[in-house]
């Protein structure tokens, strides 16, 4: 099936979108978060709503442009639903990233007021690597055996997530051993700096190590999340924009829910079920439904899986208090 938005023809949408993201990030860092601080629950919640609203506005623009360009409400509706489904999947899987953020900050003892800075640069790097993954995925997904392979990988990852015991100990992480072996380290946080000069020599601070670990973990997560969105749509533009929009709100979402993440005891099972579902969709269900599993069904199933895990977690918490 040919793409609705081939990059050679619609390069200007990619360029304009990246320009919008650069502008928003510049305003975020240079105006609203110029001074290092720990966002309050109210501030984080408002930013979370703002990022979601921005994604919804972009989706609305994409819908109306598609309606104007193709003259079909059916095509425009499919584009809008695919963007929404991709956004929901990425937001859902991003919850796992948030648990990693909390673990990394605790391990490296990153002060609360500097966590936003680490996440800002971490997510900026994530945008770059996601772009590479999506471009590579758009090429590889042309081959049926690759699609099946990614589908099986998502199913196995989901099953592993469901049955693997939680491990909060980072001491045995091989990449940390490599970093400590080859980088000159200091325990001084440098008042929020990634690098510090001591006696004329350059050292990396715990903030830099936290940034590297967060970046590395996001690359690992991208192996799951990017194919998961390709299971919902074959349009690279939709994959790219929905993925990036979802990532942009990660920082505010982290500060909004970091205080009660431990309350969601069953959330990992919801995430695991989503991965298994999109893996089945990629490897089997799309073919069984004539090449395209209904996007509306996909969206409802994903919301139901995540929602049921959240409800189950809240019921468990309520029963524990009773």
Image (cartoon, rainbow, N blue to C red):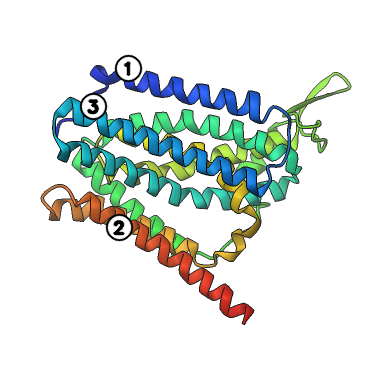
Q: Can you name the residue that lies furthest to the left here?
A: 290
Instruction: Give the position of the C terminus as an image quadrant.
Output: bottom right
164 w.r.t. 116: above or below? below
Distance between mark 2 and mark 3 Cα atoms: 26 Å
Q: Nearer the viewer, residue 6 or 182?
A: 6
The answer to whether 262 is drawn above or below residue 143 in the figure is: below
Please tell me whether mark 2 sits on a helix, a strand or a loop: helix
| Place of residue 157 in the rendered image (x, y in percent of width and height, measured from the top left) | 40, 55
Considering every residue shown, the one lying at the far bottom of the view is 322
Q: Position of residue 5 (x, y in %)?
A: 23, 26
Give left or right: position of 201 versus 36. Answer: right
Say the numbered circle drawn on residue 5. 3
Q: CA distance from mark 1 to mark 2?
A: 32 Å
The image position of residue 61, as x and y in percent, is 32, 30
Question: Quadrant location of residue 28?
Answer: top right
Residue at image coords 50%, 22%: 22
| Location of residue 108 in the rendering, given as x and y in whole percent from the top left corner | 73, 45
Q: Is residue 216 left or right of residue 152?
A: right
Give yes or no for contact between labels 3 and 1 (Cβ–Cβ under 8 Å): no
Q: Earlier in the sequence, mark 3 or mark 1?
A: 3
In the image, 5 versus 125, the foreground residue is: 5
Residue carrying label 2: 300
Between the residue at mark 3 and the residue at mark 1, the CA separation in whole angstroms equals 11 Å
Q: Residue at x 66, y 37 (%)?
A: 116
Corner quadrant of residue 14:
top left
- Residue 148 vertical position relative to residue 123 in the rendered view, above or below: below
Q: Considering depth in this image, is 9 or 190 the residue closer to the camera?
A: 9
Q: Which residue is labeled 1 in the image?
A: 12
**Res 288 label:** none
């Amino acid at each position: 099936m040919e793409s609705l938005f081939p990059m050679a023809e619609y390069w200007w949408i990619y360029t304009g979108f990246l320009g919008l993201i650069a502008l928003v990030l510049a305003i975020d860092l240079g105006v609203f978060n110029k001074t290092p601080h720990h966002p309050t629950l109210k501030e984080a919640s408002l930013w979370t709503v703002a990022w979601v609203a921005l994604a919804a506005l972009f989706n609305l623009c994409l819908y109306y442009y598609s309606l104007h360009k193709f003259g079909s409400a059916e095509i425009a509706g499919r584009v809008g639903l695919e963007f929404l489904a991709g956004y929901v999947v990425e937001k859902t899987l991003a919850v796992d990233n948030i648990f990693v953020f909390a673990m990394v900050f605790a391990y490296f003892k990153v002060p609360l007021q500097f966590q936003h800075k680490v996440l800002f640069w971490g997510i900026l790097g994530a945008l770059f690597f996601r772009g590479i993954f999506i471009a590579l995925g758009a090429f590889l997904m042309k081959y049926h055996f690759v699609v099946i392979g990614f589908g099986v990988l998502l199913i196995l990852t989901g099953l592993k997530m469901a049955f693997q015991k939680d491990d909060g100990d980072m001491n045995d992480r091989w990449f940390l051993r490599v970093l400590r072996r080859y980088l000159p380290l200091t325990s001084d946080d440098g008042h929020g700096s990634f690098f510090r000069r001591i006696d004329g020599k350059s050292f990396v601070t715990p903030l830099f190590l936290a940034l590297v670990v967060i970046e590395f973990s996001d690359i690992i997560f991208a192996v799951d999340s990017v194919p998961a969105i390709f299971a919902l749509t074959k349009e690279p533009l939709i994959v790219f924009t929905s993925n990036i929009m979802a990532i942009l709100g990660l920082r505010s979402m982290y500060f909004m829910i970091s205080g009660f993440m431990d309350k969601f005891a069953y959330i990992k099972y919801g995430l695991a079920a989503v991965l298994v579902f999109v893996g089945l969709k990629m490897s089997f269900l799309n073919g069984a439904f004539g090449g395209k599993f209904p996007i509306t069904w996909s969206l409802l199933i994903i919301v139901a899986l995540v929602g049921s895990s959240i409800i189950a977690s809240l019921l468990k918490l309520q029963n524990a208090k009773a």
